[in-house]
Image (cartoon, coloured by chain):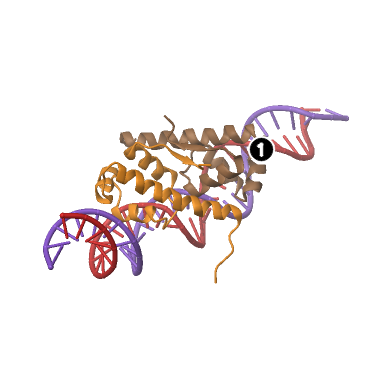
Chain colours: A orange, B brown, C purple, D red
DNA sequence: GAATTTATAGCGTTGCCCCCGCTGTTAAAT
DNA sequence: ATTTAACAGCGGGGGCAACGCTATAAATTC
């Protein structure tokens, strides 16, 4: 069975997936593999994979980290 | 004793504080007390207080929630 | 088919966030 | 002055999800 999500929860889930895609796109544009970026950022490679695939909701601290190492300004929320 | 922070950790900490301030400013601009906003967002008031004061790093899911209820587009990181 | 890259799963640790309560400040009002 | 109330700061116990780590396998590219 699938639980109903409120409009807010839908937007949150939606943004999580969009953010993962955005991180992947920018990472590839910068020419990094997940492993290379992970090493630069000093985080675990599996974590990047999970984030890009929206497997869990990351903290803002982590998003700041991506912003620094990818040199990209993320927006919450883009309209 | 005070631990040394890397440049990245400094930026993260810095952004955490700036974000808290920004949330407070926008909240007040919208005319909400912490309690009123907490009720609208269905989260705990003390959580808002702690976030505004940078007591912990929030998840992106929560930042999305603030973005929705304050109708404001947060940037990570603003340069 | 070898090499590289990525997805995913399990388990352990950390810390976000909930919830409650107490304190301190400020303002109103008589 | 003291009450009353609105508002914010702060502390702590507890639950659960983020994230680290390791390993395996799938997908992609050569």
Residue A25 x/y as whole percent: 35, 46
Q: Please determine whether, in this image, residue D28 is positioned above or below residue A41.
A: below
In the image, taking residue C9 as reference, residue D4 lies left or right, namely right
Q: Position of residue A31 (x, y in %)?
A: 26, 43
Image: D29 above or below D2: below
Marked residue chain, label 1: B
Residue A60 can be seen in this image? yes
For the image, the number of numbered tags is: 1
Residue B31 percent location from the top left of the image: 67, 34
Q: Quadrant of residue B27?
A: top right
Q: Residue B66, image x and y in percent? A: 56, 43
Q: What residue is rendered at 33% in x and 52% in y?
A: A48
Please say whether residue B1 is visible from this viewpoint: no
- Of A65 and B52, which appears nearest the observer? A65
The N terminus of chain A, quarter of image: bottom right
Q: Residue at x 59, y 34 (%)?
A: B26
Q: What residue would you read off at disc 1?
A: B32
Where residue B8 sits, quadrant-wise, is top left
Which secondary structure, mark 1?
Answer: loop
Give A32 or B58, whichever is nearer the viewer: A32
Q: Residues within 10 Å of mark 1 (few under 14, many from 20)?
A: some
Indicate the quadrant where residue B25 lies: top right
What residue is drawn where x is 55% and y is 68%? A2
Name the residue rendered at 37%, 52% in the picture: A52
Q: Image check: A30 left or right of B69?
A: left
**Left or right for B67, reference A26:** right
């Amino acid at each position: 069975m699938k639980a109903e999500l409120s409009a807010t929860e839908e937007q949150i889930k939606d943004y999580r997936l969009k953010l993962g895609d955005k991180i992947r796109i920018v990472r590839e544009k910068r020419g990094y593999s997940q492993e290379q970026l992970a090493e630069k950022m000093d985080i675990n490679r599996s974590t990047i994979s999970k984030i890009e695939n929206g497997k869990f909701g990351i903290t803002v601290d982590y998003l700041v980290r991506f912003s620094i190492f990818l040199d990209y300004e993320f927006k919450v929320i883009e309209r």
